[in-house]
Amino acid sequence: MNMKNNEIIEKIAKSTIRGKLKYMLSILAMFGLISLVAFSSETKAETLVEKETTVVVEKETNIPTESTKPNETTGPNETKKPEETAKASIIKKSSLSPAKSKVILLDPGHCRKHIGARGNGLKEEDVNLDIGKACRNYLNKYSDVTVYITRTNNKCLKRLKLGDCLTARNHLAKRLSADSLVSFHINWDPDKKRSGAMILAAYNSGYNKNVSKTTQALGSSIMSNLQELGIKSEGFWFRTLDNVKYKNGAKADYYSIVREGVLNRIPSLIIEHGYVSNKSDCNNYFKTAEQRKSLGVADAKGIINYYRLSAKNIEGDFQTISGKTYFVDKEENKIAGWVKKDGKWYHFNNKTAVMNKGFFKEAGNKFYLNPKTGEMTSGWFTIRGKSYLAKGNGVVVTNQIYTDGVKSYFFKKSGKRKNGWVTYKNAKYYFSKKKGMLKGKQKIKGKRYTFSKKTGKLRKKK
């Protein structure tokens, strides 16, 4: 090796930013092991390609979430801006809609105050609640159904302010405009050998006959799934009242849940899953939480089969990007439109995929989404002192008279509830702030009026 040349190269190399690198390259070049010019140009090209590839990968995979803030240190991608990620994401349109879904109200029978049957160390209200929750959870795997449940604890349903604990269940179904009401129970009999499940449904009275047909068909579907668990079927029980009749003169159904369902035109049935008085039924189907869950799942499958539910939920989760909330699926697409998550509905702007909040319209229907969470609202809600009501499918009631099973109200085109005098379809009505639609003989501001006892239409003024 020529030491003099080596000293010159060393001085040049150390005087540059890449001194150390050039120094090593020079040594190797002197030994004829590599070409200094060729190596330098290839290194620059490879570095450029490497940088370009890194940028592409970041756009495809680095989606910021609430737990990964832009200013946090996360390694090589820490300088990637949320805006860049948002632009790179694909927006995919959802085909789901709560307005098209079936609305099912599940009812775990009884409560702490109005207790159920007792036997073999079990309390009916507790067993019913576990069955109901399991049924709800399984149904919520589907997006062509919206599920409600009358209670999630043992409190009395009188708190709903829809009548007493029993009738409040049917009135809630009416308020939600539910497609059906399914009430969960377990039976009791002095004969401890009696066992098996039975369905309490509406008999063929001829009054609102579609209701009785639905309760029987839905009940059959549920019973088939219970039998698959090994439960003996006791079939249907049709019981009537002697002193109460429907408008067509037929005897009314005995059980309140069933009877009120017929009157409200909402198919309502009771499932007696077995006998708490029978030790075998208790040990095989009620004793453990897992057994109760199996009953609830069987009930859910019966409902799914009857209504032919098939739409599954979009799998994914909420993500916050640049302060805006999106729903991102497993393929990292932003979803636009409706999404059902944990049994609740949310809507994302059809163009930007940003979560919607407040009022918005779609396909002629008006909805209200919680201004904080974005969750779809159902039931009564108040905005700036004005009352509104949304059905179980989220559609806000507008331009009509609507009853919640207890009282009737009038809602304007905007959805606001209107009190006082209302002219609707060429007839006059009066709606009290506390009582809703007035019927019969009434005194209003010192004057007497007579309204139809059935329809509430003004008849004459005295």
Image (cartoon, helix red, strand yellow):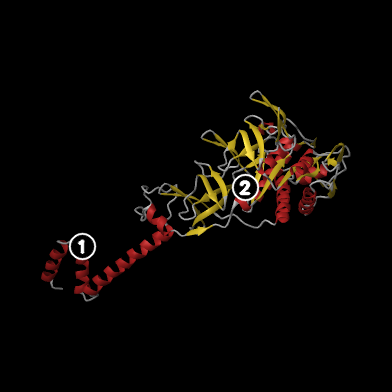
Q: CA distance from mark 2 to mark 1?
A: 68 Å
Q: Is residue 48 above or below residue 246?
A: below
Counting from the top left corner in percent of width and height, residue 50 is at 33, 65
- Give percent across and percent down for residue 301: 71, 53
Residue labelled with disc 1: 18
Q: Say whether residue 201 is visible.
A: no
Q: Amino acid at mark 2?
A: Asn
Q: Residue at x 53, y 44 (%)?
A: 369
- Check the image and name the residue furthest to the top: 446
Up the image or down, 201 lies above or below 456; here it is below
- Secondary structure state at the residue bearing disc 2: loop
**Residue labelled with disc 2:** 393
Image quadrant where residue 84 sits: bottom left
Query: Residue drawn at (59%, 44%), measured in percent from left and top?
Result: 396
Indicate the position of residue 200 as horizontal and vertical percent values: 81, 44
Reply above or below: 132 against 22.
Answer: above
What is the x, y in percent for residue 74? 38, 51
Q: So how many labels did they put on this image?
A: 2
Q: Give the label on residue 84, or none.
A: none
2 vs 1, front mark: 2
Q: How dense is the environment of label 1, judged by Cα within 10 Å: few (below 14), some, or many (20 and up)? A: few
Residue at 20%, 66% in the rendered image:
22
Q: The disc labelled 1 sits on which kind of residue? A: Arg
Mark 2 surroundings within 10 Å by alpha-carbon count, few (fewer than 14), some (14 through 19), many (20 or more): many
Question: 12 or 221, which lies in front?
Answer: 221
Give the mark nearer the N terminus: 2 vs 1. Answer: 1
Residue closest to the eye, 390 or 324:
390
Which quadrant of the figure contains the N terminus?
bottom left
Q: Secondary structure at mark 1?
A: loop
- Screen quadrant of the C terminus: top right
Could you tell me if the residues under marks 2 and 1 are in contact, i.e. CB atoms within 8 Å?
no
Task: Decide if residue 59 is on the left or right side of residue 410.
Answer: left
